Amino acid sequence: MSNATEVFQPLQADDPPVVAGYRLAARLGAGGMGRVYLSHMQGGRPVAIKVVRPELADDPAFRRRFRREVEAARRARGAYTAELIDADADGVPPWLATLYVPGPSLTEAVARRGPLPVPAVLWLMAGVAEALQAVHGAGIVHRDLKPSNVLLASDGPRVIDFGISLAADLSSHTATGSTAGTPHFMAPEQASGGEVTAATDVFALGQTTAFAALGRPLYGEGSAVGVLYRIVHDEPDLSVLPEQLRPLIARCLAAAPEERATLAEIVEWCRRRLGADADAGAGPTVWRDVMGPEMTVPAPVPDPTRVLHTRPLVVTQPQPLPAGPEERRARRRRTALITTAAVTAGALLLAGFAWTVSDAGDRFRDWVAGTTVTPGPGKSSTSSGSGSASSSASAPTSEKGSGGSRTDGRTPEASKPSATTSAAPRVLTQAPVLLNAETSLSFEEPLWREDRKGDIRFDCEDASCAIESDTSVFLQMMGKSGTTLDECRLMLGGADRHRWTLASVAAATEICVKHPSGDIALLVVQTKSTALPELGFLSLDMTVWKNAA
């Protein structure tokens, strides 16, 4: 655990870079409910972001329970809980953010150093009992208290996932008929499908405390069925525990819920055994010995708008990067005009033309519009103030006489487009299209295929649905809708993902795609259904710009 690389794992291809405005810095882990990431608040304080699994997110009943438990968890604030900072039960996917605790879990601490000394176990038990008091005071039963849900901070333990695990486990129980919770740390009534109350968490606290003192589960290892049978039918062997801890743990592990110790009794019992150390606040010293070397938390991820890979600007001094797509397009247009003007002026000087400044400006504007100017008889080469590039290109013309001259002073040959004018890319569109396990999308007509031979395919692997391609790369656009070709082209410059998870995709989500041929596509999601992966699909609109990269 002292090695930060074991804690902070790099983001993988199917991890979203941003969740609800929180830029993700590392992956912390994954569980039955979803994945957990490290992020930071605007002030730099680290937070843990938990993102719900897609199949749970698509279940309306789960969302209702998740919303109810999130609201309850907002009220559960205590010295030994990881405070809930933010959450969105209606998000796509649902997510929550808690303060990040820079310390190992009890599971990791025991694996690294073995069983904890008795004073540390007493501090642990008292701290977790106080955390459960705050949780129960908010009307929440944890239901899944276990060593991996107890984090060891420098000033004491922190209980995580309170209330939230209830919502996830209820959904799992409804879907599968299985008993909710972790088998090795269940109470008998929980293992047998009975009523779960605050006393259920007390039983789990006794098991968690025994694990800290022994370095292994009190009811032994083995299959879940075997462990649950022993919990329901057998008395635990407390003789293996340190003698000082046996009386209290025995009270916590009483078979009848009403015979178990209360949380207030547990806190008071631990304080009496700690004696003067409790009054002197010796807990932090004990925890430093248990935690080991302090970890270095990764720094916040910078705003990507400051590190975009754009084409070099023709300037002599460093320039600030544009703030948004509109300003970036304006900057590129200005840069192109400056560069073209320099090249044109140099060519004209070498050819010996002696243009005045106004004449050169007039001809340059016509050149941009795609025409070559030849002054007619009696015509000045200086244009009027309204002769912009766009109006020069679109102004109507009229011929007079057999000489073929025009009222605007140009010859028919002169009004032909210049060979240097680039044609706009050809555009293909199709809407809506259905993408599922039996269809695919192509960059060639027809864009939608009734087989899997197209370039873009829908796939659900390990309950995580995604779109994927062997050749093209994907990038989900964030923020406002109405993504343009220029924005896709710019943002795809550094894209390298051939598989894009649909966890953060909702209706109206826009995804840019680039094919090696230079074609660029924009996918606009209309409907997403991934609750049942084997029946999952996307309904979307597709626009393809040919040879646009």
Image (spheres, helix red, strand yellow):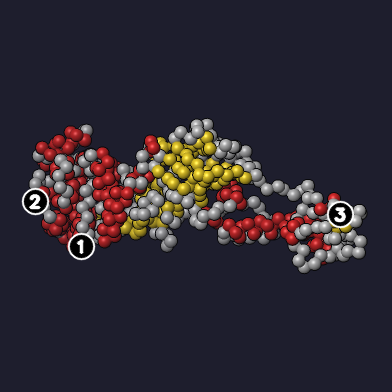
Identify residue for label 2. Answer: 258
Q: Is residue 326 above or below residue 230?
A: below
Identify residue for label 3. Answer: 411
Q: CA distance from mark 3 to mark 1?
A: 99 Å
Q: Residues within 10 Å of mark 3 (few under 14, many from 20)?
A: some
Q: Amino acid at mark 1?
A: Ala
Identify residue for label 1. Answer: 280
Q: Amino acid at mark 2?
A: Glu
* Residue 422 visible from this viewpoint: yes
Q: Residue 86, position in %: x, y?
A: 35, 58
Which of marks 1 and 3 precedes in the sequence?
1
Q: Residue 125, position in %: x, y?
A: 19, 52
Q: CA distance from mark 2 to mark 3?
A: 102 Å
**Is residue 371 found left or right of 197 in the rendered image?**
right
Q: Nearer the viewer, residue 292 or 231?
A: 231
Q: Nearer the viewer, mark 2 or mark 1?
A: 2
